[in-house]
């Protein structure tokens, strides 16, 4: 993930942010699907806390339901396929 307003993004181990062909980057293969989810919060400090919680093993979906300010929280942060 690239730098944005709040610095670098979060990505799981083994994911590539450059289109290296190994994983990540680029468009999906024809007929493929991408699942997009997020947790929308008002403060960067809250986002950092949630990131630490996820890295410590908390479930993304339950944190999204509890803390996101986006209506997608009802679907565990899922933005659709």
Image (spheres, rainbow, N blue to C red):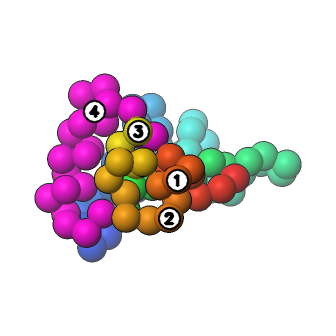
- Residue 57 appears in view: yes
**Nearest to N terminus: mark 3 or mark 2:** 3
Whether the residues at callouts 2 and 1 have beta carbons within 8 Å, the answer is: yes
Between label 4 and label 3, give the one nearer the viewer: 3
**Nearest to N terminus: mark 4 or mark 3:** 4
Q: Write down the residue under mark 4.
A: 55
Which region is colored magenta?
A: 41-61
Whether the residues at callouts 3 and 2 have beta carbons within 8 Å, the answer is: no
Separation of marks 4 and 2 at Cα, in angstroms = 24 Å
Q: Measured from the top left, where is residue 37 in percent x and y?
A: 51, 52
At horizontal 52% and vertical 53% (from top left) the residue drawn is 74
Q: Measured from the top left, where is residue 3 in percent x and y?
A: 31, 65
Separation of marks 1 and 3 at Cα, in angstroms = 10 Å
Q: Nearer the viewer, residue 80 or 8?
A: 80
Q: Write down the residue under mark 3.
A: 62
Q: In what element is the residue under mark 1?
A: helix
- Residue 25 appears in view: no
């Amino acid at each position: 993930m690239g730098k944005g307003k709040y610095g670098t993004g979060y990505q799981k181990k083994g994911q590539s942010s450059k289109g290296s062909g190994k994983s990540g980057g680029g468009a999906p293969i024809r007929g493929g699907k991408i699942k997009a989810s997020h947790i929308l919060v008002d403060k960067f400090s809250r986002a950092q806390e949630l990131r630490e919680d996820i890295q410590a093993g908390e479930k993304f979906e339950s944190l999204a339901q509890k803390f996101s300010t986006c209506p997608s929280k009802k679907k565990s942060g899922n933005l659709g396929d």
